[in-house]
Image (cartoon, rainbow, N blue to C red):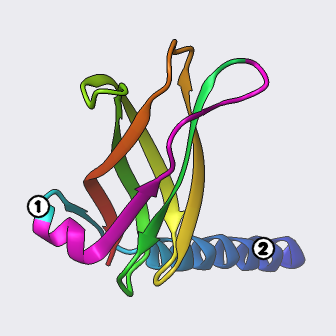
Amino acid sequence: MRKILVVLAVAVLAVGGYAFVSAKDKGAMVQIKDAKQIEQTALAFVRNPYQDDYQLVRIAGYVQNLGRAKIASAYLEIQLLDGDGNKKELVKYQVNEVPAYSRKSFDANAGSIAGSRKAEVKITRLEVVK
């Protein structure tokens, strides 16, 4: 009986310790919506869209973390323009887990779109771990 209680106590302490360490690692989430702060924290880049083997339009790019805090999520708006520069489609995309001072690539699916397009990207919001 005593061995069962000791094993049970050790298990409770182990689970509690893990929960404490996990909560500590996550840190507090801070949302950044101000354009100037976003510009100082992250940079986004996209190439012009291309069609994949299934005739779907894809947009490749990356998010560059310029700061020392991890970006939990970067919310992007990718504006697709026709040959004359007129706004056509808007693709919203989220890039997760960009470590400090690092770059994370993405390849977004924009669906089935007729005609060629150019792309412009804007970061609308960041969630940063502090």
Which amino acid does the dot numbered 1 rest on?
Answer: Asp
Q: Regarding mark 1 in the picture, which secondary structure is present there?
A: loop
The residue carrying pointer 1 sits among few (fewer than 14), some (14 to 19) or many (20 or more) residues within 10 Å by Cα, namely: few
In the image, is residue 62 above or below residue 10? above
| Mark 2 or mark 1, whichever is nearer to me | 1
Which residue is painted at 35% across and 48% down in the image? 75
Which residue is painted at 43% across and 75% down in the image? 70
Quadrant of the image for the N terminus?
Answer: bottom right
Quarter-of-image position of residue 81: top left
Magenta span includes 51? yes
The residue carrying pointer 2 sits among few (fewer than 14), some (14 to 19) or many (20 or more) residues within 10 Å by Cα, namely: few
Residue 78 coordinates in the image, percent (x, y):
36, 39
Which residue is painted at 32% across and 78% down in the image? 130
Residue topped by disc 1: 34
Which amino acid does the dot numbered 2 rest on?
Answer: Leu
Q: Residue furthest bottom?
A: 68
In the image, is residue 15 above or below residue 31? below
User: Is residue 51 left or right of 28 when viewed as pictured?
Assistant: right
User: Is residue 106 left or right of 95 when viewed as pictured?
Assistant: right
Q: Which numbered tag is attached to residue 5?
A: 2
Alpha carbon distance from label 2 to label 1? 54 Å
